[in-house]
Image: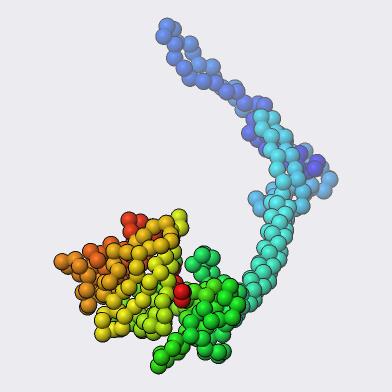
């Protein structure tokens, strides 16, 4: 420290010598003053002879020499003050902090990788479970046909019977436990074939719509044979309805909703064969809240290719449907929409159910 102070004092003495006068040149607006002559410099004295060994000069530190020092310093010089810390200490601290942060990031990255592997494994489990459920659902639908829809227009899980296997019945009124719902095999008297039908409390359902999952814009032959899913939306088929109603008197019950429920019952329901274009017999409505079909009693069935309505154009073609029409009017087989596109009397509806029961 003494050597450093001696060095600083020497620099100070060189910059500000005591034996030198300073003067300034300037002019005044009135009378110029004579300049003061500089004081002659003293001649340096000759060094005294000495027998002492010469002193070693204090070395001037290089500019970067303090980088290796682990220190802090404060230098005070008249008119200025320098403070700071050695660069090596700051650099070491920064490097250490970066190393710590790097380790933290490595640990977090490792944890993220572990979590990602766990999520991938879970996703694979979910995918496998989904595939399994898809397979099981398909199997269940083939066996029991159990949809998840509004209870008024859906089959439930009570007394659901297996398709194909099991006894045959003339109609749903012969099925044991008539209070149950299920799919059974029917073969009416004098019918050359058996067919599957959905039975509900002794009633045979011949049409059901509720969500638009089945396209009802079908051809003549499809309306004759039937289409759709007995567990969901379907049309039983005019040939099957004809074979049922030839064995006795039946009542047709129609239930429609949007969302209010309307009903209608016609006690003299029957459908003729294809040779008479599946002509409809109804009679008058005897029970219910809204009549939508009495005006089509005696009408033939119509499709776009078979125009049997009383309109001067083609109702079935206009509505892309198949039904019994007078001058159009009610149509439970037209295009379905959420706001209600099916028509019953003067109401637009979203759900319909047509079922028949032997009197």
Residue reaching furthest right?
52
Residue reaching furthest left?
312
| Whole-percent x, y for residue 234 in the image | 42, 75
Quarter of the image with the N terminus in it = top right
Q: In front here: 337 or 279?
A: 279
| Whole-percent x, y for residue 134 in the image | 55, 79
Q: What residue sits 29% from the left and 67% below the top?
A: 296
Does 258 appear above or below 315?
A: above
| Whole-percent x, y for residue 26 in the image | 47, 17
Q: Is residue 129 visible?
A: yes
Model colouring = rainbow
Q: Is residue 192 left or right of residue 174?
A: left
Q: What residue sits 57% from the left and 23% below the top?
A: 22
Q: Quadrant of residue 126?
A: bottom right
Q: Is residue 312 left or right of residue 326?
A: left
Residue reaching furthest bottom?
192
Q: Quadrant of residue 213?
A: bottom left
Q: What residue sits 48% from the left and 85% below the top?
A: 170
Q: Is residue 144 visible?
A: no
Q: In front here: 101 or 307?
A: 307
Q: Is residue 318 left or right of residue 52?
A: left
| Whole-percent x, y for residue 35 in the image | 50, 16
Q: What residue sits 36% from the left and 60% below the top?
A: 291
The number of callouts visible is: 0
Does 67 appear above or below 222?
A: above
Does 26 appear above or below 139?
A: above
């Amino acid at each position: 420290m003494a050597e450093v102070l001696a060095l600083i004092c020497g620099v100070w003495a060189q910059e500000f010598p005591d034996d030198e006068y300073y003067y300034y040149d300037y002019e005044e607006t009135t009378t110029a003053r004579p300049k003061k002559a500089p004081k002659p410099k003293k001649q340096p004295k000759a060094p005294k002879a000495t027998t002492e060994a010469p002193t070693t000069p204090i070395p001037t530190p290089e500019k970067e020499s303090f980088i290796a020092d682990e220190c802090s310093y404060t230098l005070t010089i008249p008119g200025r003050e320098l403070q700071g810390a050695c660069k090596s200490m700051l650099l070491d601290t920064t490097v250490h902090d970066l190393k710590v942060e790097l380790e933290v990031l490595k640990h977090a990255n490792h944890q993220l990788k572990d979590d990602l592997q766990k999520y991938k494994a879970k996703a694979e489990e979910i995918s496998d479970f989904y595939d399994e459920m898809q397979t099981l659902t398909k199997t269940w639908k083939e066996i029991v046909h159990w949809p998840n829809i509004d209870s008024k227009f859906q089959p439930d899980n009570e007394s659901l019977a297996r398709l194909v296997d099991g006894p045959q019945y003339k109609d749903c009124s012969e099925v044991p436990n008539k209070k149950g719902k299920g799919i059974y095999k029917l073969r009416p008297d004098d019918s050359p074939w058996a067919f599957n039908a959905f039975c509900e409390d002794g009633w045979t359902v011949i049409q059901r719509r509720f969500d638009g999952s089945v396209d009802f814009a079908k051809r003549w032959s499809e309306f004759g044979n039937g289409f759709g899913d007995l567990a969901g939306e379907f049309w039983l088929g005019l040939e099957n309805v004809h074979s049922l109603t030839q064995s006795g008197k039946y009542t047709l019950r129609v239930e429609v909703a949007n969302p209010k429920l309307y009903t209608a019952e016609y006690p003299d329901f029957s459908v003729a064969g294809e040779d008479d274009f599946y002509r409809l017999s109804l009679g008058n409505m005897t029970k219910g809240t809204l009549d939508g079909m009495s005006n089509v009693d005696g009408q033939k069935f119509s499709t776009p290719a078979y125009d049997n309505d009383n309109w001067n154009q083609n109702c079935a073609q206009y509505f892309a449907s198949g039904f019994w029409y007078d001058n159009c009017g009610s149509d439970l087989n037209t295009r379905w929409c959420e706001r209600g596109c099916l028509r019953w009397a003067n109401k637009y509806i979203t759900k319909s159910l047509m079922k028949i029961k032997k009197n």
